[in-house]
Image: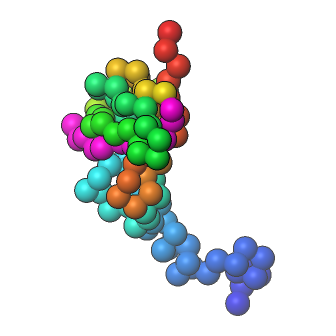
Amino acid sequence: MAAEDEIIGFNRIDATELLRKIEGGTRGGFGQNTYDATTMQIAVATSGIPARAGTTLGKATVALKYLERSGADKVITDMAQTMTAYNLAGTAVATGAYIMTLRLGDCAIVIWEECPP
């Protein structure tokens, strides 16, 4: 066993598997092979998302986005895909607001909302 394997705890097979999982998760949308049930995604609440009512989460269809390199910058790019996002908050998400969702299995929960101007 090499010294670096003893210190880090990864061998070549572990590192190859980790890289395969990371590469599979790029761009993130549904239908992509992420190898992991937990994913953060950028989306736009095209028609807003209603607030939670008691224990029932608000839900709406949102448009998925991803970050693409444009020279030295990153730009928000449309994925031409939608998904249902669930709102845990007691206040509605505004129409057109950018959001971040945390996908837990097949459920995407809003965890961040752009502040209205």
Query: Which stretch appears magenta?
Result: 79-90
In the displayed structure image, the side of residue 59 where residue 88 appears, left or right: right
Residue 74 in which image quadrant: top left
| Residue 20 vertical position relative to residue 106 in the rendered view, above or below | below
Q: Residue at x 32, y 62 (%)?
A: 33
Residue 64 in which image quadrant: top left
In the displayed structure image, the side of residue 21 where residue 61 appears, left or right: left
Q: Residue at x 72, y 85 (%)?
A: 2
Q: Position of residue 28 (x, y in %)?
A: 37, 50
Q: Nearer the viewer, residue 41 or 69?
A: 41
In the displayed structure image, the side of residue 6 where residue 15 appears, left or right: left
Residue 11 in which image quadrant: bottom right
The stretch drawn in magenta includes residue 83:
yes
Q: Position of residue 73 (x, y in %)?
A: 48, 26
| Residue 45 vertical position relative to residue 28 in the rendered view, above or below | above
Q: Residue at x 52, y 69 (%)?
A: 18
